[in-house]
């Protein structure tokens, strides 16, 4: 018995939709079976809360008097890209401050704006006949500016990797601090709660899908960069490594600093924890087959991050249940594991979204265009013009 | 008589046995090894409670520093700022004594102070700097 998104929305409006989070659906299906779950459950909420480096915000400041065409701009000493029109900039999450280095970066600027804190804006310009001002220094908050919205080119990775270190020294990576000689291993995925692992072939998550983004409303705005759906998959559809990604957009002014948090990875750089929640409509039994996926059914590969090359040696695969137990075996050695993304926060977001859908304040959307299911994942080779 | 809690950090090479022996024999100190761990990052750590005469403790500390041991007063704690923590659990992978772990039910970070040996490996691994040292 198939359902349409319109039918599910009718139920949501009446407050009659049955909504579970992606953890609850596992036991529900085990108890009642796929058929019953497909007819009884309308929506399953998924979520993730992890450091997502490929994030940032577009800001329009409004015009000063006399006006300026900003050529270079800084927010709290963090350079923002000003090569778009006169008073539009893009501040990237990983951009470090020119005065404080990686202690404070673009992600902190975004978090401060969300919290309503004042941020110092500095900009310089050549000056033109129509934009005579050559420099400006002022303070802004989210309430003094025209627009501020996140545009994150690559978020919510469909699975990732496990990082470990075989070398004799501690290494500092975007997967955190890795102690020498296989002492620890880190991973980063919400696993059974993760949006794209619950909809592995992107049947319901596509361009135009309304999502929970950083505490406010957001949308999937495009295919994420490095989207690689052709990755090896298990029979349940889940990819074994980095696969699908989404680009997301949402109004920064609606967000909360509980769900967007600046992160600093020691001796590496700045990143940003982004909280994303996506409700998945239970269209039919096939969706339930996907949604019942649990941590032990999702595999991920272990890589040696001490090898400073594009391809790193693999130490085999583990599943997320093993990873969450706190210990895995690598080369017969017991290795402590830790997550870089927060399962607790992902669960909090999934529950929050469940509450919103149940209470009728969050309706589902039909996507406008699906994410591609094929495509090439390219590397950057160093070539001369003739070799192209 | 005085009682002091000290954290000794020593390079892997130093054999600890004669050191502790000397503390008893030559400086007449009573001591209690509360925790000891050789961390894989080329350092050993020992949380020690010493009891003895003021000047003897001072002399013993001088001797220890002379053989290449770094001494810190252990009048400090590792503190987790729960309002800042996002419960990712990265620190749990680095915590050798498993004083830091994720609660099985809530998946939130749990800190068992009595298991902590103040090795401080967790400090710079926290991406939101929620782990602090209280001096």
Image (spheres, grey):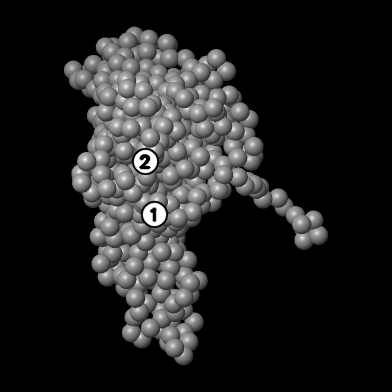
Q: Quadrant of the C terminus of chain A?
A: bottom right
Q: Position of residue A118 (x, y in %)?
A: 27, 64
Asked which quadrant contains residue A47, the reply is top left
Q: Which residue is mark 1?
A: A219
Q: Quadrant of the N terminus of chain A?
A: top left
Q: Is A245 situated left or right of B90 in this image? A: right
Task: Check contact, mark 2 vs mark 1: CB within 8 A.
Answer: no
Q: How many marks?
A: 2
Q: Residue at x 44, y 77 (%)?
A: A86
Dot in front, 2 or 1: 2
SS class, disc 1? strand
Chain of residue at mark 1: A
Most extreme residue toward the right, as rendered?
A: A386
In whole angstroms, how far apart are the C-alphas of marks 2 and 1? Answer: 23 Å
Q: Nearer the viewer, residue A24 or A136?
A: A24
Q: Position of residue B43 (x, y in %)?
A: 46, 25
Q: Which residue is mark 2?
A: A3
Q: Residues within 10 Å of mark 1 (few under 14, many from 20)?
A: many
Say whether disc 2 or disc 1 marks the residue closer to the N-terminus: 2
- Taking B96 as reference, is A163 above or below it? below
Q: Is B116 situated left or right of A341 in this image? A: left
SS class, disc 2? loop
């Amino acid at each position: 018995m198939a359902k349409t998104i319109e039918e599910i929305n009718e139920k949501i409006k009446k407050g009659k939709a049955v909504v579970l989070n992606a953890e609850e659906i596992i036991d529900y299906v085990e108890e009642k079976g796929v058929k019953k779950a497909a007819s009884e459950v309308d929506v399953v909420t998924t979520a993730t809360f992890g450091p997502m480096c490929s994030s940032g915000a577009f800001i329009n400041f409004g015009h000063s008097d006399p006006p300026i065409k900003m050529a270079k701009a800084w927010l709290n000493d963090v350079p923002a890209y000003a090569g778009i029109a006169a008073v539009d900039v893009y501040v990237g999450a990983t951009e470090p401050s020119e005065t404080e280095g990686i202690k404070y970066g673009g992600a902190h600027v975004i978090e401060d704006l969300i919290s309503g804190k004042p941020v110092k804006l500095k900009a310089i310009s050549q000056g033109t006949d129509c934009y005579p001002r050559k420099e400006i220094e002022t303070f802004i908050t989210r309430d003094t500016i025209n627009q501020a919205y996140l545009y994150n080119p690559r978020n919510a990775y469909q699975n990732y990797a496990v990082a470990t270190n075989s070398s004799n020294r501690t290494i500092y990576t975007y997967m955190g601090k890795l102690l020498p000689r296989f002492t620890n291993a880190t991973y980063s995925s919400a696993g059974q709660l993760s949006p794209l692992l619950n909809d592995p072939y992107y049947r319901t998550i596509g361009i135009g899908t309304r999502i929970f983004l950083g505490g406010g409303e957001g949308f999937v705005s495009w295919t994420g960069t490095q989207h690689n759906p052709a990755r090896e998959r298990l029979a349940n559809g889940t990819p074994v490594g980095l696969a699908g990604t989404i680009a997301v957009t949402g109004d920064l002014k609606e967000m909360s600093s509980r769900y967007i948090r600046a992160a600093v990875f020691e001796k590496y750089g700045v990143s940003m924890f982004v909280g994303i929640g996506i409700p998945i409509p239970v269209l039919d039994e096939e969706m339930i087959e996907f949604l019942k996926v649990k941590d032990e059914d999702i595999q991920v590969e272990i890589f040696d991050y001490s090898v400073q090359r594009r391809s790193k040696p693999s130490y085999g695969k583990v599943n997320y249940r093993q990873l969450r137990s706190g210990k895995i075996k690598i080369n017969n050695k017991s290795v402590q594991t830790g997550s870089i993304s927060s399962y607790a926060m992902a669960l909090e977001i999934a529950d929050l979204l469940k509450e919103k859908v149940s209470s009728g304040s969050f309706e589902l959307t039909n996507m406008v265009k699906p994410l591609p299911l094929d495509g090439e994942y390219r590397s950057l080779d160093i070539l001369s013009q003739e070799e192209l | 008589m005085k009682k002091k809690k000290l954290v000794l950090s020593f390079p892997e090479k130093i054999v600890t046995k004669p050191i502790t022996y000397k503390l008893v024999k030559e400086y007449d100190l009573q001591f209690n090894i509360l925790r000891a761990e050789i961390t894989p990052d080329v350092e050993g750590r020992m949380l020690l409670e010493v009891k003895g005469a003021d000047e003897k403790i001072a002399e013993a500390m001088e001797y220890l520093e002379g053989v290449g041991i770094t001494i810190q007063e252990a009048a400090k704690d590792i503190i987790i700022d729960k309002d800042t923590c996002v419960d990712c659990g990265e620190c749990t992978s680095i915590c050798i004594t498993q004083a830091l772990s994720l609660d099985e039910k809530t998946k939130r970070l749990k800190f068992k102070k009595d298991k902590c040996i103040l090795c401080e490996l967790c400090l710079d691994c926290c991406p939101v700097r929620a782990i602090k040292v209280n001096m």
